[in-house]
Image: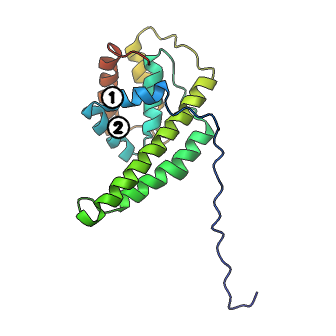
Amino acid sequence: MSPNSKASPDLSVKTIELPENLEPDNPLWYFALTFWQHSSVQQTCLALQNEGWSVTRILCAGWLALNGRSYTGIEDATVTEWRDRVTGSLRAIRTSVPKAQAPYEALRTNIASLELAAERIELALAWRALTESSSEQSNMYEREKLIRSNLATAAPVSGTTVSSRRLLSTLGDALIALQQGYTQP
């Protein structure tokens, strides 16, 4: 190579190893759809996401609590890799596109659809990991304590802030209200 020529950057991307028998239609997905119907849940989850929380981790924690299981916070590497490389990348692209400007509305909408599809796969990967793990039934007597404990365990490495604790309280209240009418599909 001559001193004036530049090496081309390696633009190859490693493909994520995904299972062939992934189940996008699973109880965790249906729970997410049910829980997300509450506007306070949407607003709260998105506010926590803006603080660095993973909505998938929050949904897993809530679903497990409603099913009487503790959330360890330990996540399968494939779930994390998918979130970081796919879902997170699509979210970053979507939030980079100008909001409320007509020329970009279709692009933003299409990217949001792709982001939702990636989130569904992320939840399917999480579901697979949760069903393969030997998560034990909680020995906690009160479901409310389990809900709040699981949500706190979903915290990012940076921990919780005063703001996030208030938001978690809102989510906990929503899960407590939901548990009375929730049936697992």
Please name the residue shown 32% across and 19% down the image.
178
Q: How packed is label 1: few (under 14 Cα within 10 Å), some, or many (20 or more)?
A: many
Q: Is residue 55 above or below residue 180?
A: below
Q: Is residue 137 above or below residue 107?
A: above
**Which amino acid type is shown beneath numbered disc 2?**
Cys
Task: Specify the color scheme.
Answer: rainbow
Residues at marks 2 and 1, CA–CA distance in whole angstroms: 8 Å
Residue 138 place in picture, x, y as percent:
52, 13
Q: Residue 23 — which label?
A: none
Residue where numbered disc 2 is placed: 45
**Which amino acid type is shown beneath numbered disc 1?**
Leu
Residue where numbered disc 1 is placed: 171
Q: How packed is label 2: few (under 14 Cα within 10 Å), some, or many (20 or more)?
A: many
Q: Is residue 150 among the parts visible in the rendering?
A: no
Mark 2 lies on a secondary structure that is: helix
Tell me whether circle 2 and circle 1 mark residues in contact (CB < 8 Å).
yes
Q: Is residue 130 above or below residue 108?
A: above
Residue 96 place in picture, x, y as percent:
37, 61
Q: Nearer the viewer, residue 136 or 30?
A: 30
- Report the quarter where the N terminus lies: bottom right
Specify which label sits upstream in the sequence, 2 or 1.
2
**Left or right position of 128 against 111:** right
Please name the residue shown 64% across and 38% down the image.
19
Mark 1 lies on a secondary structure that is: helix
Quadrant of residue 63 in the image? Answer: top left
Q: Is residue 104 among the parts visible in the rendering?
A: yes
